[in-house]
Image (cartoon, rainbow, N blue to C red):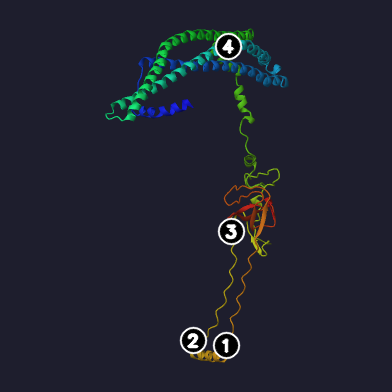
Amino acid sequence: MKGITKAIMRTPHMMTSKVGMSKTSSDPEFDNYNRAYTSLEGATEKLLKDTKAFTDAVVSLLSSGNQFAVHFASIFTPGANEFNIESKFPEAMATFRHATPYQQEMDELRATLSPELELIESRIVGPIKELQSIMKLIRKNITKRDHKLLDYDRYNNSLVKLREKKEKTLNDEKNLFKLEQDFERSVNEYETFNNALKADLPRFLTLATQFIDPLFHSFYYMQLNIFYLMMEKLQGFAEKKYTTGSTSEDVVAEYHEKRGDTLDRLEALQITHRIVSTGKFLQTRTPSGGTGLSRSSTSVSNSSHAAPPPSRANTVSSKISANNDFGGTTKYGSLASRKGAAPPPPQPYSAAPPPYVAGDSPASRSAASLAAKKAPPPPPPVKPKPAPKPAVVYVTALYDFEAQAEGDLSFRVGDKIELIERSDSAEDWWTGKLNGQQGVFPGNYVQA
């Protein structure tokens, strides 16, 4: 609570000093030591992170090498047994025989390097953490010194303003006496921390250098030992198995020589290329004008259940009369030639004939007037009733159908399609409307 109160009291001076309204004090000698100390803090933190990163990288390297051997053996060992590679490719059997020993070598190498990694943890990481704990205490004292300097500037600015005031009241005199006491106390506290840090920081920086130098040498030799053990283990494994004195260019040249034309033969396999879809496959093999479907392919999601759509070549070309479901008679021509055409609109009913008008002769006019006087005109004939509109018939989609050409009607399973025109055979293309679009579709894809 006391610290919060002091922080609140220091806030106004901190804000005014940032905008240049209050004077601040500084000690160049201490500032120089503080910059060196801050740099040492950052270097120590980076050293700790890099040491941990090196340890993790070595562990990951060993684990990856072990897993490489495991996967290599699991992939190629079954192949050697199943396809009798020893007789077909005897030069490759050395690789199969060395996969399992390589895995054992990696396990042994990981066990051998484990104590070295623990040594890095105890002799490098541990001392660095101890150094960081000491540096945190020093940083706290530097922070306290900054707070004391802030109090010193705050009391000094207030004291100078009050002393420069020409007409002082009794209350001002009391505040002046209190400020002088606070200023004197802040001076003593600031000088205590500032002088102690200026005396001890150079010594600490020298001792820290002497502390870090042995860590560097120890870490260097530990790295060297790890690399030497890895090289010795791998060279022992490669002895009498592989040639280790070759250059990188020799290794690459030998690899290409042994590989030969294997890559070309792999690329020549049919399974390495994209397989043509069934529709395109049938399109390339179905002769034009045959009895097969005229469409190259039909997109059907339920291909295991959907029957192929009927061929347009089998559509009846001659006009036939068939009783449809509309209650009337529809004449069909070749649906292939009339694909997408809307059915003809119903014939409008005939209007009632106008009443008979006699000639314009005087005799006829007099006769008409006499007839009009004698009897009223007959009622107009009854208008004929309009022909009833055919009932709307819907069919239900059994399968999905995607339009393959202009004029086709796409739909999904379960869609209700308004039937516009149909034939007696379900193995034909019918005309329907769905969602305001009209087109043809295979009749065996729907249920009437």
In this rendering, which labeled residue sits more in front, label 4 or label 3? 4
Q: Is residue 204 left or right of residue 276?
A: left
Give residue 123's quadrant in the image.
top right
x, y (%) of residue 146? 41, 21
Give me the residue at 28% from left, 26% from top. 164
Q: Earlier in the sequence, mark 3 or mark 1?
A: 3
Name the foreground residue: 330 vs 117: 117
User: Identity of the amino acid at label 3?
Assistant: Ala
Name the foreground residue: 414 vs 240: 414
In this rendering, which labeled residue sits more in front, label 1 or label 2? 1
User: Identity of the amino acid at label 2?
Assistant: Asp
Q: Secondary structure at mark 4?
A: helix
**Disc 1 target residue:** 376
**Disc 3 target residue:** 342
Q: Secondary structure at mark 2?
A: loop
In this rendering, which labeled residue sits more in front, label 3 or label 2? 3
**Disc 4 target residue:** 122
Spatial CA span between label 1 and label 2: 20 Å
Among all residues in the image, which is located at the extreme front? 170
Q: Is residue 264 above or below residue 246?
A: below
**Disc 2 target residue:** 360
User: Identity of the amino acid at label 1?
Assistant: Pro
User: Identity of the amino acid at label 4?
Assistant: Ser
- Evaluate if marks 1 and 2 touch, with contact meaning CB atoms under 8 Å apart: no
Q: Earlier in the sequence, mark 1 or mark 2?
A: 2
